[in-house]
């Protein structure tokens, strides 16, 4: 009797799902609250540095140049498309069409990779061409140095999230291929989706703050 | 040697029965919340002793004016910061996490935490992060900027040492560990409650862990963001100038972010203690807690208000007077829900049939002495007074009344209270009482005079002081040595009783323990419950006495 109970308890325990959802989903939601607060800290720092009298902050569109803004706007579009693809993964999985689900998962991952490549290109361009004063004291900075510093920490921290999301989604894709993630494991995909949409949402905030206004 | 042990302490495999090494490995890799809880408590005890030794070094130097025990003033400068770091991040917070690991799943009727592996990982981040944080000690590169690490002192220009980088990164790691634990506790309490365990049926210790986890979830990441900025600024001094005015940065920004975390953090360090006291007092008064819903709501109120008062640490930084007055008002407001709790505990004891075992003594001592700390807090909250008292020993007295006479006393109450449950043995009551009296007396000897020192103008964290302050400092130092020595009795009692103590009963406290943990054997079995438990909802009205409310549950649990 006791042994039998022990084996039952190894699975979803009695009393689990008091709220009618899986533990994993609650775990992800609470994690996202935490993550959002980390970004809130960084964004608050950004706001304070930028909006103090005499901060000598450039207007982003001028500082980045029109091409820079347009490239990043395109990148934003890519990330949103990737998020939409993720919705399709779940939709097909729920209907039991794992082939299509895999296809959309590949699209999601590719979207993330494109985003990272464009961002990598942009960083290189900014460091080498736009902001030579960063690593060479022979050049004079044209405006508040924190314009570059906050840019790096915000987009860098977000980029790290994208990279983690790409790895996370790739692991699920591999699970789908090897048959470990089947049409029954919708909550696995749903939870990964929560993360991916969150990363998207944060990007829209970062984009707005750092590039647009 | 044959390893035995009852309940969750018993080896899981045959191999572990005969080999101590296998048994130990089983513990270190266990995902059982009870075992992880014990690991947390052991780690916290060790770090508490480390922090204690650091404080003894501080007090030894300050016993008399002028260079004495510590000849190297730079070394002295590093001590207060490391003492605080050890005590806050590696002693009090992990100790409460450990107690919560053991007790919370049981109190809500769950077999384990929601994410057992995450739980294990969160614990195992702690020892390495302690090593990283304290790395400076190993190659003599100690930051001297206190536990608050204010820039510009903490920037590369003024602390160009690796020990400082390690300290900052170590703290980021601890933050990761404690947020992992918080996610786990919330998922556990939200989703793993047994039948009948509605939110307003939860035992108050569990409530306190829920509220604390929210605080951790919302506050700790803000510290992480500040420390990340500081790290980048330290590692790439020519590129990042968040806090350095030379590059357009703002040192006050750091203080805002830091205190946005660290004021809630003081509640992270006291709310679980409030929860423990709310368990201990009803048991030893044999009555239900007075005003249960108010007790839960007041914790929520404290948590919410706790996010709106951080600038009371920054009255002297030049922020606008109107803003400071607003923060002063909100700060004083927090005393209201805190007072509600104090009166509810007194109301619980009122008319109860009290027993004075060690946990109860600590609970009562806590109420009396924590109140002193709360009152000195209200004094500090007043802008005009604080401009005089800021960064003096008065603040040191305040924090030690709330943290030593507060958090630490609640921790002792909790450890004595649950010791029979955790180990299956009774501790030695006589030495428990001796520990209590010595602790209570020497806390006051050590810290009460510091109020006076502060008002007289002795600054905190300084290596040397005016000879006029010699007598009070000597009293404080002698008190602190005795206080430390008394803690050795405690550690000895815990270790000795585990081997030699009497076997504990299931409901160890005269059959008066009420929640689930007292309705299972001491120590509990591996999966807590043999059958999914069910909680029979109760009305915790204040007239409820032992006889009426305990009766129907006691059958079979007194054994
Ligand atoms: C009625 C409640 C409280 C009030 C009104 C209050 C108020 C204050 C104020 C105004 C200060 C700033 C003093 C200064 O630096 O000039 C302070 C410092 C501090 N308080 Fe409290 N406090 C209260 C309760 C607590 C509790 C419950 C804890 C911890 C469990 C706590 C821990 C601390 C610590 C650690 C500091 C010093 C931080 C530092 O500068 O290193 N306080 N408190
Ligand atoms: Cu505070």
Image (cartoon, coloured by chain):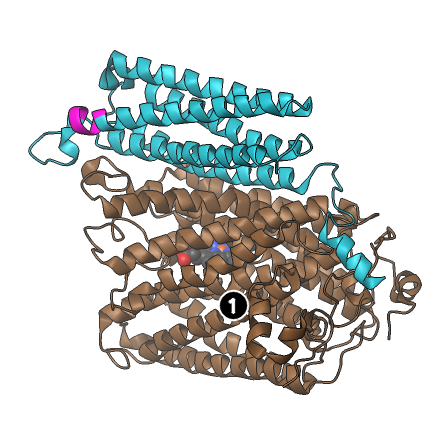
Q: Which chain does the cyan colour mark? A: A
Asked if residue B530 lies left or right of residue A147, the reply is right
Q: Position of residue B47 (x, y in %)?
A: 46, 69
Q: Position of residue A138 (x, y in %)?
A: 6, 33
Residue at image position (57%, 58%) is B270
Reply above or below: B394 against B225: below
Residue placed most toward the observer, B469 or A57: A57
Q: Position of residue B48 (x, y in %)?
A: 48, 71
Q: Position of residue A139 (x, y in %)?
A: 9, 30
Tag 1 residue: B44
Q: Residues within 10 Å of mark 1 (few under 14, many from 20)?
A: many
Q: Chain of mark 1?
A: B
**Magenta stretch containing residue B169, yes or no?**
no
**Can residue B379 be seen at all in this image of the molecule?**
no
Query: Which segment did they paint magenta?
Result: A125-130
Q: Colour of chain B?
A: brown
Residue at image position (41%, 34%) is A163
């Amino acid at each position: 009797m006791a042994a039998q109970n022990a084996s039952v308890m190894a699975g979803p325990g009695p009393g689990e799902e008091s709220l009618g959802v899986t533990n994993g989903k609650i775990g992800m939601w609470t994690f996202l609250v935490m993550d959002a607060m980390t970004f809130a800290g960084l964004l608050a720092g950004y706001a304070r540095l930028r909006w103090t009298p005499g901060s000598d902050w450039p207007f982003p569109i001028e500082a980045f140049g029109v091409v820079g803004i347009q490239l990043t706007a395109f990148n934003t579009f890519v990330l949103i498309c990737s998020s939409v693809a993720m919705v399709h993964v779940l939709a097909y999985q729920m209907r039991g069409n794992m082939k299509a689900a895999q296809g959309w998962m590949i699209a999601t991952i590719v979207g993330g990779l494109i985003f990272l490549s464009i961002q990598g290109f942009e960083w290189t361009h900014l460091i080498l061409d736009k902001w030579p004063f960063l690593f060479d004291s022979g050049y004079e900075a044209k405006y508040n140095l924190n314009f570059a510093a906050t840019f790096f920490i915000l987009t860098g921290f977000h980029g790290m999230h994208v990279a983690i999301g790409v790895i996370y989604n790739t692991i699920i894709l591999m699970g789908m291929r090897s048959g470990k993630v089947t049409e029954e494991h919708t909550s696995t995909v749903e939870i990964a989706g929560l993360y991916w949409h969150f990363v998207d949402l944060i990007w829209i905030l970062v984009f707005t703050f750092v590039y647009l206004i | 040697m044959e390893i035995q042990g009852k309940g969750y302490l018993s080896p899981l495999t045959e191999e572990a029965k005969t080999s101590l090494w296998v048994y130990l490995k089983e513990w270190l890799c266990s995902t059982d919340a009870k075992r992880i809880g014990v690991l947390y408590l052991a780690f916290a005890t060790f770090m508490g002793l480390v922090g204690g030794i650091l404080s003894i070094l501080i007090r030894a130097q300050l016993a008399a004016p002028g260079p004495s025990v510590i000849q190297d003033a730079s070394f002295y400068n590093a001590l207060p910061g490391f003492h605080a770091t050890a005590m806050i991040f590696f002693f009090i917070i992990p100790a409460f996490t450990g107690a919560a690991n053991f007790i919370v799943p049981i109190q809500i009727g769950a077999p384990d935490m929601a994410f057992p592996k995450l739980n294990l990982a969160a614990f195992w981040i702690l020892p390495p992060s302690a090593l990283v944080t304290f790395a400076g000690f190993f190659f003599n590169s100690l930051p001297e900027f206190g536990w608050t690490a204010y820039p510009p002192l903490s920037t590369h220009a003024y602390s160009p040492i690796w020990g400082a980088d390690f300290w900052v990164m170590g703290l980021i790691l601890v933050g990761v560990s404690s947020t992992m634990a918080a996610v786990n506790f919330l998922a556990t309490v939200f989703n793993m409650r047994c039948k009948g365990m509605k939110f307003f049926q939860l035992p108050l210790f569990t409530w306190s862990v829920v509220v604390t986890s929210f605080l951790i979830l919302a506050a700790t990441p803000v510290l992480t963001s500040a420390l990340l900025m500081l790290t980048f600024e330290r590692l790439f001094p020519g590129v990042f100038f968040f806090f350095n005015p030379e590059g357009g940065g703002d040192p006050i920004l750091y203080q805002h972010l830091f205190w946005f975390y660290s004021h809630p953090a003081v509640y992270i360090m006291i709310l679980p203690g409030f929860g423990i006291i709310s368990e201990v007092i009803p048991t030893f008064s044999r009555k239900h807690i007075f005003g249960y819903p108010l007790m839960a709501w007041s914790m929520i109120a404290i948590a919410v208000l706790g996010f709106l008062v951080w600038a009371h640490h920054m009255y002297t930084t030049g922020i606008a007077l109107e803003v400071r007055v607003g923060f002063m008002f909100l700060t004083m407001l927090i005393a209201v829900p805190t007072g509600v709790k104090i009166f509810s505990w007194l109301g619980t004891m009122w008319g109860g049939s009290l027993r004075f075992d060690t946990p109860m003594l600590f609970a009562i001592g806590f109420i009396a002495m924590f109140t002193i700390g709360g009152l000195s807090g209200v004094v500090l909250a007043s802008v005009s007074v604080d401009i005089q008292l800021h960064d003096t020993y008065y603040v040191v007295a305040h924090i030690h009344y709330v943290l030593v006479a507060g958090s630490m006393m609640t921790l002792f109450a909790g450890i004595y209270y649950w010791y029979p449950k955790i180990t299956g043995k009774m501790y030695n009551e006589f030495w428990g009482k001796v520990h209590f009296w010595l602790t209570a007396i020497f806390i006051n000897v050590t810290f009460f005079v510091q109020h006076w020192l502060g008002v007289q103008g002795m600054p905190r964290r300084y290596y040397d002081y005016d000879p006029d302050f010699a007598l009070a400092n000597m009293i404080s130092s002698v008190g602190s040595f005795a206080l430390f020595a008394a803690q050795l009795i405690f550690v000895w009692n815990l270790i000795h009783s585990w081997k030699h103590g009497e076997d504990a009963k299931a409901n160890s406290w005269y059959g008066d323990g009420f929640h689930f943990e007292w309705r299972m054997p001491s120590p509990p079995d591996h999966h807590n419950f043999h059958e999914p438990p069910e909680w029979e909802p109760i009305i915790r009205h204040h007239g409820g006495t032992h006889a009426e409310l305990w009766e129907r549950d006691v059958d079979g649990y007194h054994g």
